[in-house]
Image (spheres, coloured by chain):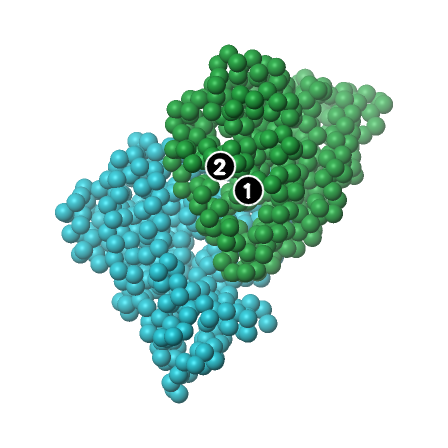
Chain colours: A green, B cyan
Amino acid sequence: MPLNLRIPGPTPVPEEVRAELSRDMINHRGPEYASILAECTEGLKRVFQTENDIIFYPSSGSGTLESMVVNTLSPGDPVLSVSIGSFGKRFAEIASRYGAAVTSLQFEWGEGAEPSVVADKLRAEGPFKAVLVTHNETSTGVTNDVKALADVIKPTGALMLVDAVSSLGAINLETDKWDIDCVGTGSQKALMLPPGLGFVSVSKTAWEAHKEAKMPRFYWDWTNCMNYQRKGENPYTPPVSLYYGLRKSLQMIEAQGLPSIFRKHEELAAYARGAMEEMGLKLFSTPRWASSVVSAAYVPDGISSKQIQKIMEDKYDVVIAIGQEHLQEKIIRIGHMGHVGKADLAECMSCLRETLVELGHHVPAQAVA
Amino acid sequence: MPLNLRIPGPTPVPEEVRAELSRDMINHRGPEYASILAECTEGLKRVFQTENDIIFYPSSGSGTLESMVVNTLSPGDPVLSVSIGSFGKRFAEIASRYGAAVTSLQFEWGEGAEPSVVADKLRAEGPFKAVLVTHNETSTGVTNDVKALADVIKPTGALMLVDAVSSLGAINLETDKWDIDCVGTGSQKALMLPPGLGFVSVSKTAWEAHKEAKMPRFYWDWTNCMNYQRKGENPYTPPVSLYYGLRKSLQMIEAQGLPSIFRKHEELAAYARGAMEEMGLKLFSTPRWASSVVSAAYVPDGISSKQIQKIMEDKYDVVIAIGQEHLQEKIIRIGHMGHVGKADLAECMSCLRETLVELGHHVPAQAVA
């Protein structure tokens, strides 16, 4: 039985994309690569819903967060971190490490960032040079309302830097329409590729900030990256095999259409939440903020998330995620982003049900999964 | 005809390795990944000839250079850059960007770093906190004598940070025996993988320096990386497919044996230089320093490197590199590192000969290639 990988990334890679990964190398400073880079840039712009520049990195998604910070800010700049979980904390930590003056606005894990609370904070403690926002927080299964946040953040003149690592291409994010300055994402989530490529979109306002930004940088330097990208190259040797795969996965996304992909994820999430509730599990995220790419639920009393994870993997080849930090043993998280269908998720839910029964949890009789 | 990729990286990837790249994803925080990471770590230690820690990055080789700088140095630290070409300049530029006080010792392109000259500089302008050295300079086809350099650098107490991106696994580099503090390399050269993974070895002395080092860092932070690696993980999602390939390529290197691999590269280089000289081309690098992984030669008067490159690719599917910076049109560079045999190189030389004839160059009758 093939692995049913139900973690919130890396996500399963479609066979057509995997076939591309094993193609041999080409000259990364030649015309064929330039043409792939151009095609990927255009395809990504459609997924980012932007006309802004998109910068490519040989990096994980976290690298794209660091690039936004060091390219737009100077040490001492006041920054507001809007954090709803582990990845929000990471974003703030990056800014702190480089000397930004970070004010932290932390919401309870499981909740999203309430725009009116963010507005109050901006009024009370602003102005800020930048606001750091996580679109989808995989540690809690929560999606922020980026549009509503932009509505309160952008009028203050702050740059809005958005971590969309686990959301872009699966959850609607209208970069240009909502006027988001920077959006960063990675290859291994909704883009259906292995990890190893990061992408950041850069608005005109962010480019203006870049000119004044004094944080030190070399690898992440936007000017250097774009100078090369404009001639169809990258400053450093690019992960060529992932570019082959990206071109293919972007074609697949294009063929399916973003609205249909967004809808698929919403339907899968509704199904996952319904199934878990029917098994008697309490959902972790508040319904209003529940993510459409990862669903989290408390484990029953007396059972650890690690037991569930282990049995599901050993017995059924279904791999789910457990909680992070203080929630490690308290919640399970089930990913349904990218290359995933209803059957994969149904199988996962069925195995979860069996596992809970095996662990002595009373599963209500009507549970359909 | 398949592409004969004769640039100094990315290099051709063996079929067995390419097959690994298309395997599907696994949980990067599970036991199977931990076991792959452990096997890769042990295999790499043998290639690095070290017992030091090896840190893995989702990055290109340049990222590993940045990681050495920001993890061992503080702004204002005196650093000696020993530069013999374009990649030496890059290493110095990274240190400057992060505020090191860089003294530059630049040798003529085509020459290696004369140890006695380096010793004089260390005496006259030292002490330095660190010395930056390129092992093999692909922009010029020159290999430094790292052992002889270590003999003059290490007694001064300076850290020795070595860019071995294009040499490690193809040219002998005895990290522990020569007491090299940090060695950085990338996946796309002698390791026979696509680009996208970087590795750095860290000596005890480098770890001591790390404790005091104040340059800002997050993505590159060694402490964070090793905290995760010790439990079989990485801080950020690793490029899983490249790890599959790395495990395989390390097995292949192990089977062949480093001494035999080093010898192969020396023989290929001797063949390449001989063939080019017989065609009437003047070698670019001084014989004493000539690299065994990339061979550079001046183009004949009245012919541009770009013309040669274009004809070879369009007509013969042989891809060579041209010069960098001021040498762009003046030299050609032919890579013979990693997964390459005599037949590949012979084909390349034969096509080069045909191309030169086509361009009106008089090739001496005795030219064998």
Q: Position of residue B320 (x, y in %)?
A: 46, 67
State yes or no: discs 2 and 1 in contact (Cβ < 8 Å): yes
| Res B101 quadrant in image | top left
**Residue A226 seen by the camera:** yes
Q: Position of residue B93 (x, y in %)?
A: 34, 45
Which residue is located at x 76 percent, y 34 percent? A263
Which residue is located at x 33 percent, y 31 percent? B214
Which residue is located at x 35 percent, y 43 percent? B94
| Upstream in sequence: badge 2 or badge 1 | 1
Which residue type carries mark 2? Answer: Trp
Quadrant location of the C terminus of chain B in the rendered image: bottom left
Q: Residue furthest left?
A: B124
Q: Is residue B107 above or below residue B102?
A: below
Q: Which residue corresponds to mark 1?
A: A53
Q: Position of residue B236 (x, y in %)?
A: 52, 37
Q: Secondary structure beneath disc 1?
A: strand
- Front-most of residues A112 and A360: A112
Q: Position of residue B311 (x, y in %)?
A: 51, 72
Which residue type carries mark 1? Answer: Asp
- Front-most of residues A59 and B108: B108
Q: Which residue corresponds to mark 2?
A: A207
Q: Residue furthest bottom?
A: B365
- Crowd band around label 1 with a 10 angstrom C-alpha radius: few (<14), some (14–19), many (20+): some
Q: Read off the chain for label 2.
A: A
Give the alpha-carbon distance from disc 2 to disc 1, as whole Å.
10 Å
